[in-house]
Each structure stands twice: as C-alpha cells, then as structure tokens.
Amino acid sequence: MNDTKNAPKYESLVLRVLWMLVFLLVWQVAQLVLGGLVLVQLVYRVVYGAPNAGLMNFGDSLSLYLAQIGRFGSFHTEQKPWPFADWPAPRVPEGEAPYVQGAKGEETKP
C-alpha cells in the first residue's frame, strides 16, 4: 500500500515544519529587538517628552512582522514572512504625537 498521492503533501509538510523552526528562531530574536526598542523608546520619551517617530514606525512594522510569523506558524496563511514577502509597512500612529525637531535644530515638543 504505497500511496504516492500523499507523498507530496508529506514532503511539503516536512518543508513547512523546517521553515516554522527557522521562523521560531527569528521570532526569538525579533522579540528581543522589540523589547530593547521599547526600553529605548521609554528613555527617549522621558528625555524629550515625546516618543521618537522612527522608533514608533519600526516598532509597529516589527510587531506586524511578528504577527506574520504567528499567522504562518498557526497555518492561517501559506505566505512565508519576510524575506519571502515584503517587510510590513507601519500604520499611522494612534497614540502620542512624536517628537519633532525644529527647522534650525531647536527643540520643539508637540
């Protein structure tokens, strides 16, 4: 009873499991980076009185990337996350306005 129809499905499942293991490692690294970003953003907020726009955008896109990994790992999608797909674009901030530096370098707070 050699069922050759199930062989491609099994091979693709094995390949998917391997990719899931790779993305599990990527998840761990991305989680550490996001944790560091949160701490740096907190210090920046305390010093300047408002969050950094670049850190806000990168934090949002990194969290969306983690969500992509979660969707792939939970079989919600077949699309593998970055670098196989585009890096997620950050959304429009919904919280505090970011810190803005004046035109001549003077500090301005929102």
Image (cartoon, rainbow, N blue to C red):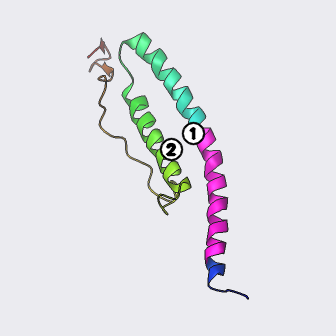
Please, which residue is most extreme toward the right here? 1
Q: Quadrant of residue 96?
A: top left
Residue in view at x 41 percent, y 48 percent: 88
Residue in view at x 68 percent, y 86 percent: 3
Asked whether the residues under the numbered discs 1 and 2 touch, taking CB atoms below 8 Å apart as contact, a structural biologist would say yes
Q: Is residue 110 left or right of residue 21?
A: left
Comparing 106 with 16, the one in front is 16
Q: Quadrant of the C terminus?
A: top left
Residue in view at x 33 percent, y 20 percent: 99
Question: How crowded is the residue under tag 2: few (<14 C-alpha within 10 Å), some, or many (20+)?
Answer: many
What residue is pinned by disc 2? 66
Amino acid, disc 2: Leu
Q: Quadrant of the N terminus?
A: bottom right
Q: Position of residue 52 (x, y in %)?
A: 39, 24
Please, which residue is most extreme toward the front here? 1
Q: Which residues are magenta?
A: 9-30
What residue is pinned by disc 1? 30
Comparing 90 with 19, the one in front is 19
| Dot in front, 1 or 2 | 2
Q: Is residue 107 magenta?
A: no
